[in-house]
Amino acid sequence: MKKHILFLCALALTNLTADENCSTLPSSRPCVRGDLPDQTNMYTRISFLYWQCAEKGLDFALINTQPQFNSKLTSRHPSFQWDPAFRLLLGTHLPIDNWSIDLGYSIFYQDVRDEAHHSFDINSDAAFGSGILSVWTSPGAFLSNNIYARWQSAFAKWKIHAHFLDLMLRHDLALGYALSFQPSFGLKMAMLQQRYVLSYSPGNIVYLPAEETLLSSTVNMNNRSFNLGPGAGCSTRWCLSPRWNLFGSLSGALLGAHFQVGRNEFDVSSTASTIIGSYRISDRYWTYRPQAALSFGMQWSDCSCSKTSSLHYGFSASYEAQYWWRQNMMLRHYDAPAAQSHTMSPVQGDLFFQGLTVDALFDF
């Protein structure tokens, strides 16, 4: 009997300390005053991102530690790092059955530098095998057709500037107190600007067709894409308690992509005099590219209500990943060595973003 009395007292005390005018529901407008829905319109979300960006097809050197006819090659690519980024979302609730529209902008910047070294005796015949092989220098570079070229150092610098813009129309579907869904569709835009600079030096001495000392090879490339197209997705939320919930989302887009790619190569060698070779290539075209994204995490939120206004606020932490197909369209040679040969093809490597997203949300 005493236990029941204590339980009723605790329950009464809880009700006295709670705001009787404010309740929490699992929709995107979770604050209500009494039995009337909140009449506020605007909401915003400020996000801090700590992401890693990685791209396929950026290997810049093959390191060989064995003689020419017993090669043991190790591929080297940039060591992708983690960097901060930011996102801002502004939206409004529409005066139609649980519809809302918002505009989100994200910015990400990364600057990666890496290098490889392998020393050898440039006067030794074994140097034809041992050393660093450039995977980006033109096969037609140097008088020796580049097949015997070996380098002692390779340096790579990759930059990416990414800007994302999403205009989405959303609809809230509550299947009960604990579970809700939010399908969405709209337009997605992205501007992805990449620059890749590679340099190789010093090189070995080759003797065919004449004695030639390889001094340096530098390749400077840019890869810009403008992507625009329809996107759709669905997010879900499972309320664990009035203030805590789990959430996840999955989305995709099919984008028209305009690429601008360019490549400059500068090769220096020495015979009786210094020989300089320079190559410049550029291209522009439209194509299609798919994109997909997912996220999952946990959110805490609460309501503050009065007779004239209310505020829904909260914080969340989630893992987020975005996959962009065939965004690395930098030009790379693929044919057999031949003098003045410049046949090449885009790398067509995929681009991947992933990392931690921390959000602060306010529904006014």
Image (spheres, grey):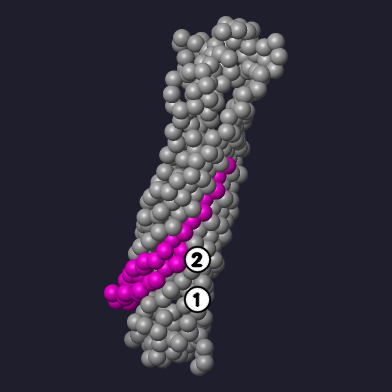
| Left or right: where 115 falls relative to 334 | right
> What residue is shown at x 38% (from left), y 77% (from top)?
99
Q: Position of residue 98 (x, y in %)?
A: 36, 79
Residue assigned mark 2: 104
Q: Position of residue 130 (x, y in %)?
A: 55, 14
Q: Is residue 185 magenta?
A: yes
Q: Position of residue 134 (x, y in %)?
A: 54, 24
Tell us which disc is closer to us: 1 or 2: 2
Residue 359 visible (yes or no): no
Single out the residue that lies furthest toward the left: 175
Front residue (pair 196, 140) = 140
Single out the residue that lies furthest toward the right: 273
Q: CA distance from mark 1 to mark 2?
A: 12 Å
Residue 187 visible (yes or no): yes
10 Å crowding of disc 2: few (<14), some (14-19), many (20+): some
Front residue (pair 314, 284) = 284
Residue type at tag 2: Gly
> What residue is shown at x 55% (from left), y 11% (from top)?
128
Q: Position of residue 191 (x, y in %)?
A: 51, 54
Label total for image: 2
Residue assigned mark 1: 43
Q: Quadrant of the N terminus?
A: bottom left
Q: Is residue 140 magenta?
A: no
Residue type at tag 1: Tyr
> What residue is shown at x 57% (from left), y 33% (from top)?
280
Disc with the residue nearer the chain's start (1 vs 2):
1
The residue stretch that appears in magenta: 166-195
> What residue is shown at x 50% (from left), y 85% (from top)?
310
Label 2 SS: strand
Which dot marks residue 53?
A: none
